[in-house]
Amino acid sequence: MLGKLTLNEKRSLVAAIAVVFALAAIFVMYSANSASALPFAFKGQVIAVDASAKTLTVKATEESSLASMGGQYTFRLNELSGVVMCGIDKDIKDIRAGDDVTVWYHEEGTGNILADSIDLSSPNMKC
């Protein structure tokens, strides 16, 4: 079959195959990087805050799907992590043990769980 192709047709076929492999490689690399960067939501109650280490430890509440897994997780915050209460921007220093939170997070390749956004509510809070 390839013997009946002209030299230019063979070159075009090789180029097309190379493009397909390049696109497949790009897709695989993108999928590998973005799979761990997908955001997840975790609802729970804050049990510890370390503002200097920028970490937040949260225990899953009953309505969380992770509660049945003994869910206590420590989230790392960075300069891009947002904390919001009643639609107002807050800081990690505004979070207290006992506060209810929804943490939007993703896992980094290093095994860290990075908090992208924290929606904060307190048992006594009125918005």
Image (spheres, grey):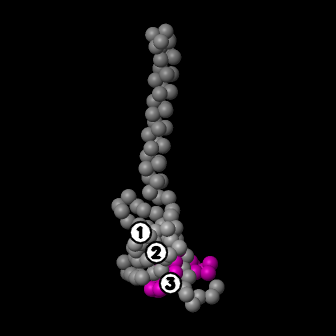
Kindly identify which numbered label has been placed on residue 33: none
Q: Say above or below: 76 vs 47.
A: above
Tell me which residue sits at (47%, 48%) in the image. Answer: 30
The residue positioned 41% from the left and 69% from the top of the image is: 69
Kindly state the secondary structure of the residue where label 1 is placed.
helix
User: Is residue 72 left or right of 39 when viewed as pictured?
Assistant: left
Disc with the residue nearer the chain's start (3 vs 1): 1
Q: Position of residue 75 (x, y in %)?
A: 42, 72
Q: Choose mark 2 or mark 1, whichever is in front.
A: 1
Mark 3 secondary-structure assignment: loop
- In which quadrant of the rendered view does residue 86 lie? bottom right
Per the image, the residue denoted by label 3 is 99
User: Which stretch did the figure color magenta?
Assistant: 84-102
How far apart marks 2 and 3 lie (CA) works out to: 12 Å
Total marks in image: 3
Label ID, residue 60: 2
Q: Front-most of 75 and 64?
A: 64
Along the line of sight, the residue nearer the viewer: 62 or 4? 62
Nearest to the eye among marks 2 and 3: give it.
2
